[in-house]
Image (cartoon, rainbow, N blue to C red):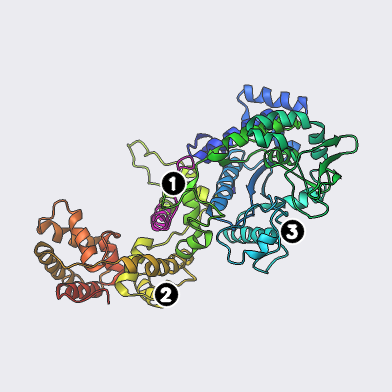
Amino acid sequence: MFQGLSHHARDAKSWPFEQARNLLARILTYGLETDAERDLASTLINAGKTDEAVKELKALGRPVRFETGYGPSGLPHIGTFGEVARTTMVRAAFRALTDDAIPTRLLCFSDDMDGLRKVPDNIENKAVLEEDLGKPLTVVRDPFGEYPSFGAHNNARLRAFLDSFGFEYEFLSSTDCYKGGLFDTTLLWALQKFDAIQEVMLPTLGEERRASYSPFLPISPKTGRVLQVPTLERNPGKGTITFRDEDGELTEVMVTGGRVKMQWKPDWAMRWTALGIDYEMAGKDLIDSVKASAKICHILGGEPPEGFNYELFLDENNQKISKSKGNGLTMEDWLRYGAPESLAYYMFQSPKSAKRLFFDVIPKATDEYLQQLEALNRPKPEPVPGEAPKPVPNPVDNPVWHVHAGAPPAQSSPVSFSLLLNLTSAANASNQDILWGFISRYIPGATAETQPLLAKLAAGAINYYEDFVRPNKVFRAPTDQERAAMQDLLARLKALPAGCQDAELIQNEVYAAGKDAGFEPLRLWFTALYEVLLGQSQGPRFGSFVAIYGVAETVDLIERALRGEDLAA
């Protein structure tokens, strides 16, 4: 799927390809295992022979490892999905850049061994969580009673959504990695480098926190809680630390086998080192944390991954989205109204610009996604003899290519989301059967099975209309100028051939009625049509609406409006 695309990838301007090229340079510089391999890669790069360098990497069989991190202390939210989606986009771009010659892995890592410090606001049964405060998330009981632990519950929620979208990833649990010994070697080395890690961390802390800070958080053998306590003694030879437990007793524990959990910045660095991570992005609020973890990674003998810092999503009140507060959209919210493809499209757009993430963005993102998909699938123009060939957009720069990880569908939706919303409104379509009655007449033979994307949009349109559009509809009576133009439009529609579904022909008649009525600018005419007939100020091309709703039905709608009937009923 990604083979034969490197010539497009090298010229691509979209941000995932910029990241992929940075990643390739990093791996060819730092990712090789021996001096001889690094010298060979350097020689090839300096000679401009990137293809040969990629072949050398392929021969090594070393996978390139991408990572995303997830803190399962609250229910998953769209920001979590965004990080996985964007990392997947960079991974696909890297595969295209290297003609898929180098194996890649995407590790979705859950920090589920962290102690629960706060009960999320958006959970009803809080008593269970309050009793387990301080314990690792995979020990905290599930307040929903569905999984062995609260961490397992939230991990399952994350995986279920990622699976439904079709992400290719490997899930890693912090608890499993600590207890299973995967981190043991690096943890023992961190114990050896205790003082060097402290030199990085202590200047970043307040005076009171510095007095008690330790990169190791022991788990009390007595209470099971993750303790924020000083390390009083350490024995690198035995691989142990000594601390004062909650009852005041001095306690010695191994740093291996899941008996301790590292503080999150040293933990991040330890994970990069132990897992050999090559790429991980993070939010803009973590820039300083990334810098500190990168220093510790070097101390542990690793090389910090390539990556970039994305801007955070805000809710409609310009507040940072928080999984504990539950503000902003959830993944379930978006999927109630929009297709998952539109969500991924929204994630692709301008990751370094802050964007508000609330319900009103869904229709716009959905229709922009459809437009991009149509543009990607549009046939290339035939060359005209004697004329210079027209430039063709780079296909891998189209957002839809990234949304679908290099395998976009060949079929878009023949009907836009905004048009479906207006159709739902005009037809009072309270269920999909009514809506599909109009759709199948406009597209003969169309069903939910033959038009899967359209089926998603139709279901979302009904939900969105009922929840957001219907409650805010405000119909008004036409002005004298608008009434005269609508009467003219009625005559024009009645004169069309029976059963006409030519959206362009209908649009021309709508234009003509508005121009003859003297609307200046003409958009005021279209605003009038939507406000009088549909109770809103915006909508899709009116000709397309009439074509799918039906000429006769539109004539009836206009006549009812001119008679002053209540169209909201």
Q: The C terminus appears in which quarter of the rendering?
A: bottom left
Residue at the spot 18% in from the left edge and 62% down from the top edge = 509
Q: Mark 1: few, some, or many residues within 10 Å (few <14, many ≥20)?
A: some
Q: Please give the residue where the numbered disc 1 appears in the rendered image.
A: 355
Q: Is residue 483 visible?
A: yes
Mark 2: secondary structure: helix
Residue at the spot 86% in from the left edge and 45% down from the top edge = 251
Q: Please give the residue where the numbered disc 3 appears in the rendered image.
A: 139
Q: Amino acid at mark 2?
A: Gln
Whether 39 is drawn above or below 501: the answer is above
Q: Mark 3: few, some, or many residues within 10 Å (few <14, many ≥20)?
A: many
Q: Is residue 519 left or right of residue 52?
A: left
Q: Are marks 2 and 1 in contact (CB under 8 Å)?
A: no
Measured as percent of width and height from the top left, residue 141 is found at: 71, 63
Q: Please give the residue where the numbered disc 2 appears in the rendered image.
A: 432
Whether 398 is drawn above or below 430: the answer is above
Q: Amino acid at mark 1?
A: Lys
Q: Quadrant of residue 77?
A: bottom right
Q: Nearer the viewer, residue 544 or 172?
A: 172
Residue bounds of the magenta highlight: 350-371
